[in-house]
Amino acid sequence: MNYKKIFMAVLYVCLFMPLISQNMVMASENIFPEKYINKQNGVTFETNIEVPEKLDFSKIKTGTAKLQYPKSEQAISEIAADIAIVDQDISSIEWKGKTVDISYYTLEDGSTLNLDTILTYTTPFFDDILNVFRVEKTDVFNADNYSQENNFSYISSEDAFQYIVDMINRCGYELGETNYKYYALDAETMQQQEIIADKAGDNSISEPREWNKEDDCYYFFAEQVYEGLPIYYGNQTFPDDGVTNRPVQAVYSSRGVEGLYVNKVYSITESGGKVSLLEFDKLAEKISDKYGNLLTSASYYVNRAKLYYMPVAIGVEDYELRPVWLFEIHEKGTDSETENEYETTLYTFLDAQTGEEVVV
């Protein structure tokens, strides 16, 4: 036995393997801090790092994904089985090299069902909800007036959401694992928060609604999850991953589903590729290089980073599933033309394995 060769092989492993792997985090480890504080190249990092609490890093693997669409016959049978259709408009368009049917239905109870690449269903009650619940981060934001924990006596939030998931699946989807947030909209608070806007096309104002316990409802915002990691759902035009952009949204009252929106839901196939994640220092270096080297007097503050699976297009309907970090960056500066101060939010995506920027 050549002991010298064995000794040299062991020495090589001991000396050089740590150098090879020192900038990589194997999938079974989680060394990401809850907060990263640093300043590099003029870029300030006071960054909350968002990783699912019980994420098993050993299960993060590469995969492929395909967009799912509603199946018209199943969706109509599920949603409009007991309600007469009083009006319909059915056509088709060429979209990404394929023919897509577009169907708009008005039902006898005043609800509408739209089916194309997206499923949208709303009852007249849903329109009233828009007068009392405002979750967008604007001057009229009021979502913090509603509980995100309460359950109503007619059904629990968990059972209501499961009903919605089952309904979506019966419309032709395979939703799989999800993560959701909800707001419990109670009648008393809705009565207090109602704002009646002018009707479109004239200056008349609708009468306020008399809200009652039957109107107590849940408003759900859900994202698809694969192996414990959420799937990113934004796009180049709307990169914000706030709840208002989540791909599954629904309102459920004591009368049942009052509103449903389903978009950008994927079926996923694991490819088995092992994943090693860069340390956060290396990712921060990439961000500081990008923004610190811009020829501008603006300042850059990195507020948060969230780990996602991102579907990256590799074909018309086919996507490669990659672990990607979303970085939220706040830019503050002075407009050179107006001399007005401004602040804007920017989003940058880095491949969690390579650190290379990913285009949404």
Image (cartoon, grey):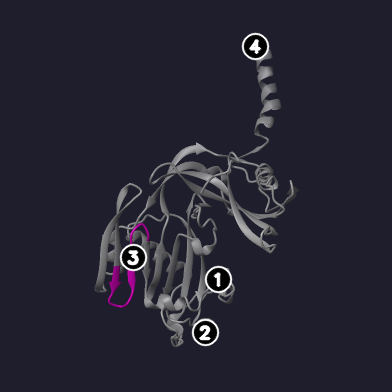
Answer above or below: position of 74 versus 209: above
Between 142 and 165, the one lying in front of the other is 142
Q: Residues within 10 Å of mark 2 (few under 14, many from 20)?
A: some
Mark positioned earlier in the residue sequence (4 or 1):
4
Answer above or below: position of 72 versus 31: below
Task: Name the spot of residue 327 as percent of width and height, x first.
Answer: 61, 52
Q: Which residue is mark 4?
A: 2
Q: Is 115 a magenta residue?
A: yes
- Distance (Cα) linking label 1 and label 3: 29 Å
Q: Residues within 10 Å of mark 1 (few under 14, many from 20)?
A: some
Image-based side of 121 in relation to 246, left or right:
left
* Label 3 vs label 2, nearer the camera: 3
- Distance (Cα) linking label 4 and label 3: 74 Å
Q: Which residue is mark 2?
A: 188
If the image is split into quadrants, where does the N terminus sit?
Answer: top right
Q: Is 46 a magenta residue?
A: no
4 and 3 marks in contact (CB < 8 Å): no
Mark positioned earlier in the residue sequence (3 or 2):
3
Q: Look at the numbered disc 2 and give the secondary structure of its residue.
A: helix
Query: What's drawn in magenta, residue-wise?
Result: 105-118
Mark positioned earlier in the residue sequence (4 or 2):
4
Answer above or below: position of 278 versus 203: above
Q: Which residue is mark 1?
A: 148
Identify the image quadrant of residue 81. Answer: bottom left
Q: Which residue is mark 3?
A: 114
Name which residue type carries label 4.
Answer: Asn
Q: Residues within 10 Å of mark 4 (few under 14, many from 20)?
A: few
Residue at the image position 63 percent from the left and 46 percent from the top: 30
Mark positioned earlier in the residue sequence (1 or 3):
3
Name which residue type carries label 3.
Answer: Asn
Q: Look at the numbered disc 3 and give the secondary structure of its residue.
A: strand
